[in-house]
Amino acid sequence: MTLILKTYDLDSDGRLSQGEVKLMVDRSLAQAMKTGRNTKQLNEMRSWTIDYYAAQDLDHDGYLSLVELLKEPLAEFDCMDQDHDGALTQTEIEAGMDHCGSGREYRSKL
């Protein structure tokens, strides 16, 4: 998440604005769009991803801080780490994709 913040925080204010998030999402989907993948599906994925990041704005100030960016992935990791050993096995990841928050939501969009 630190790398994402460093890469897309264009005004170097230590957080991502809504515009910076949209740029990040558009850049990540650009290659798929060039390959001629289903445009409708890509637009739905874009919309879902932007909404996902907007939901991470816990203080509703229109920006994402590093703390806000880390909250969901850390909760997701904790949900998937069934034996709480601080590491994920392939089995835990696969099971977690079916019952943990954003993994379940993301797979339903594919």
Image: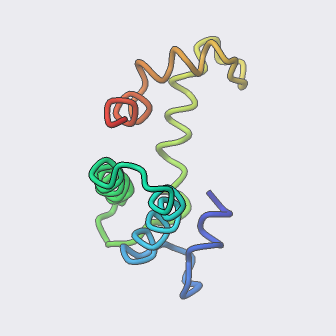
Where does residue 22 sit, x and y in percent of width and height? 39, 70
Residue depicted at x 47% and y 59%? 29
In-image side of 19 versus 93 (left or right): left
In-image side of 40 versus 18 (left or right): left
Q: Quadrant of residue 84?
A: top right
Residue depicted at x 71% and y 25%? 86
Q: Quadrant of residue 25?
A: bottom left
Where does residue 20 sit, x and y in percent of width and height? 45, 75
Where does residue 44 sit, x and y in percent of width and height? 28, 50
Residue depicted at x 38% and y 77%? 19
* Relative to 97, residue 47 above or below: below
In-image side of 94 versus 48 (left or right): right
Number of on-image labels: 0
Where does residue 40 sit, x and y in percent of width and height? 27, 52
* Relative to 42, residue 89 above or below: above
User: Which residue is nearer to you in this view: 17 or 32?
Assistant: 32
Name the quadrant of the C terminus: top left
Name the quadrant of the N terminus: bottom right
* Relative to 93, residue 39 above or below: below
In-image side of 101 versus 28 (left or right): left
Q: Residue furthest front?
A: 36
